[in-house]
Amino acid sequence: MRGIIDRFEGEWVVVEIDGETQDFEKSMFPKEAVSGDVVEIKGDKVRILKTETEQLRKEIEKLMDDVWED
């Protein structure tokens, strides 16, 4: 399954998956994981999807630019 890291809460990582949040143990995630990363979760393994994360960040930047244009 794929999701987006929403936030970190102590030893938990809150991930948004299909519009709902789920909590996962922080120990499952790579140490370099940050909020906003797109991740793939398979069993107890998590990997950061770098290409998808960068694409998502660019889409958000564009949306923000559109909102703040004069």
Image (tube, grey):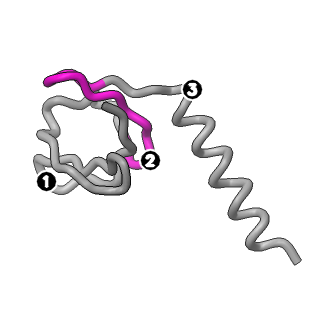
* Badge nearest the viewer, 2 or 1: 2
Q: Is residue 16 left or right of residue 61?
A: left
Q: Is residue 10 left or right of residue 13?
A: left
As helix, strand or loop, the secondary structure at mark 1 comes to loop
Q: Quadrant of residue 31?
A: top left
Residue 62 horizontal/vertical position (percent): 73, 54
In the image, what residue type sits under mark 3? Thr
In the image, what residue type sits under mark 1? Gly
Which residue has dot 2 on it? 36
Q: Residues within 10 Å of mark 1 (few under 14, many from 20)?
A: few
Query: What residue is rendered at 78% in x and 65% in y?
Result: 66
Query: What residue is rendered at 43% in x and 40% in y?
Result: 37
Q: Is residue 2 left or right of residue 26?
A: right
Q: Is residue 41 magenta?
A: yes
Q: Quadrant of the N terminus?
A: top left
Which residue has dot 1 on it? 10
Q: Earlier in the sequence, mark 1 or mark 3?
A: 1
In the image, what residue type sits under mark 2? Gly
Image: magenta residue range:
34-46
Q: Residues within 10 Å of mark 3 (few under 14, many from 20)?
A: few
As helix, strand or loop, the secondary structure at mark 3 comes to helix
- Give yes or no for contact between labels 2 and 1 (Cβ–Cβ under 8 Å): no
Q: Is residue 43 magenta?
A: yes
Is 50 in front, or is 42? 42
Q: Earlier in the sequence, mark 2 or mark 1?
A: 1
